[in-house]
Amino acid sequence: MKTASITMIIGSALLLGLFFFPLWSISLEAPQYPSGIGMYIHLDGLEGHEKHDIQNIDGLNHYIGMRKLPKKDEMWEFTVFPIVIGGMAALGIIIGLLGFFKKVSYKWFLGWLILLTVLGVMGMFDFNAWMTDYGTNLDPKAIMKMTDANGNPLSYKPPLFGSKDILNFTAHSYPALGAILMGIGMFLTFIAYIIGLKKAK
């Protein structure tokens, strides 16, 4: 169990990388922005890829009726998510330590992984719902009112994952370093469970 427990501790600790590195990255490419503009989504707020990117995105969004990007105190997620991730990292490390001293079985490793997976899916669902509202709930008094072939207002929702053409922009949405570290941590936790399972057999 010692090898499995140490692997569990390392995997759980990697979640703490989300306090130092962004979770997600959304970027926009267009002829008028040859180097692109974009933002990083952190656990506790948004940050531009470059110094003025947030300001530039808000300026573009104003013309088509999208709201300004939220500040840290304008979304409950920016308060709750750090608590959830910090709590899960601490819980995983404690479970790993208890496993090291043979106080709990390897099954706890899997239980922690399942709980984190469920919370992750809920977080992605919430993120997608926010982007849907942000990209479709437009100001009717906007300067530009773009519609599709049927006369319906266009949606400016960025993709949850991948790339999408929005007017003359191409939006890219991919995990950033924090999410990659979390994924590695979850994989190590699964490895810890498999090691514990094999030892038990």
Image (tube, rainbow, N blue to C red):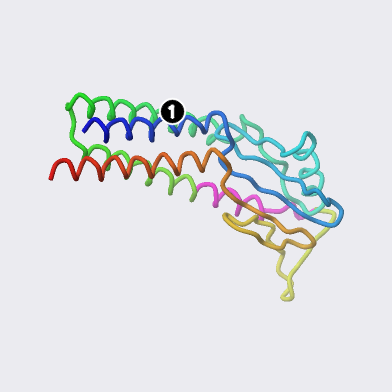
**Residue displayed at 65% across by 56% down:** 157
- Residue range in magenta is 126-141
Q: With 4 as the anchor, is 45 left or right in this view?
A: right
Considering depth in this image, is 102 or 199 the residue closer to the camera? 199
Q: Quadrant of the C terminus?
A: top left
> Magenta region's main secondary structure?
helix
Residue 133 location, x and y as percent? 61, 52
* Secondary-structure class at tag 1: helix
Determine which residue is flagged by label 1: 86
Q: With 169 as the anchor, is 195 left or right in this view?
A: left
Considering depth in this image, is 71 or 19 the residue closer to the camera? 19
From this view, report whether residue 155 is shown above or below residue 23.
below
Residue 116 location, x and y as percent? 37, 41
Q: Residue furthest right?
A: 32
- Three-letter amino acid code at disc 1? Gly
**Residue displayed at 73% across by 61% down:** 166
Residue 46 location, x and y as percent? 65, 36
The local crowd at label 1, few if under 14, some if 14 to 19, many if 20 or more residues have their Cα within 10 Å, is: some
Q: Quadrant of residue 177?
A: top right
